[in-house]
Amino acid sequence: MARVHVALPETLPFVTRLTVRVTDLNYGGHVGNDTVLAFCQQARAEFFAALGYRELDVEGLGIIVADAAIQYRAEAFAGDHLEIAVGAHDHNRRGCDLAYRLHRPADDTEIARAKTGIVFFDYRERRIAHAPEAFRERLAQRFHTP
């Protein structure tokens, strides 16, 4: 069976930090696979906040995660300080992909790579919507992306 490979764009311009908690560990004593996705969710919320948005209000629209992929690269443990870099790429008329790199700076170890595909959603109409052009413009201004 082919393994998941998450290719990251050249730049992931937003970085947030978190400390692994004991409650983030699984029975193996390291960060659980489900926790990596939760870390990405936290980083995504902070990424949108840095752009002046909330996940339920991006130019009047919300977002929905349509798909997710994670490539685990190394273990992380309680007390580890992690950096999560985030960037938006592969834009289309309904959304884009968000890429994540989880990294432990203490020993320069990549913990995981992830990608979530998001689509914009009009919660009043209960339907998928077109990606707001203002979102891409703000991305380009704030993070100097093409």
Image (cartoon, rainbow, N blue to C red):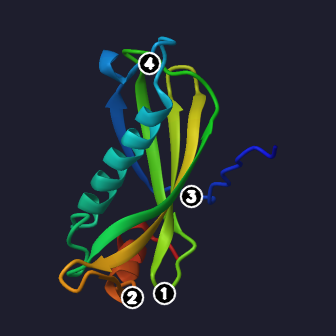
| Residue 27 screen position, x and y as percent | 46, 13
Q: Tell me the SS state at disc 1.
A: loop
Judge whether 51 appears above or below 31 on screen.
below
Q: Are marks 1 and 2 in contact (CB under 8 Å)?
A: yes
> Callout 1, which amino acid?
Arg
How packed mark 1 is, by other alpha carbons closer than 10 Å (few <14, some 14-19, many 20 or more), is: few
Q: Give the residue displayed 51% in from the left and 12% down from the top.
A: 28
What's the mark number on residue 93? 1
**As rendered, which of 94 and 135 lies closer to the eye?**
94
Q: Which residue is mark 4?
A: 26
Query: Going from the N terminus, do you reach mark 1 or mark 2 first?
Result: 1
Q: Tell me the SS state at disc 2.
A: loop
Quarter of the N terminus within the rendering: top right
Q: CA distance from mark 3 to mark 2?
A: 25 Å
Query: Going from the N terminus, do you reach mark 3 or mark 4 first?
Result: 3
Q: Which residue is mark 2?
A: 130
Q: CA distance from mark 3 to mark 4?
A: 31 Å
| Residue 107 screen position, x and y as percent | 57, 20
**As rendered, which of 124 and 112 lies closer to the eye?**
124
Compared across the picture, whether 123 is left or right of 73 comes to: left
> Callout 4, which amino acid?
Asn
Query: Going from the N terminus, do you reach mark 2 or mark 4 first?
Result: 4
**As rendered, which of 117 and 43 lies closer to the eye?**
117
What's the mark number on residue 9? none
Query: Going by the picture, which residue comes out furthest to the right?
Result: 1
Q: Which residue is mark 3?
A: 11
> Callout 3, which amino acid?
Thr
Q: Tell me the SS state at disc 3.
A: loop
- Mark 1 vs mark 3: give the one in front: 1
- Mark 3 vs mark 4: give the one in front: 4
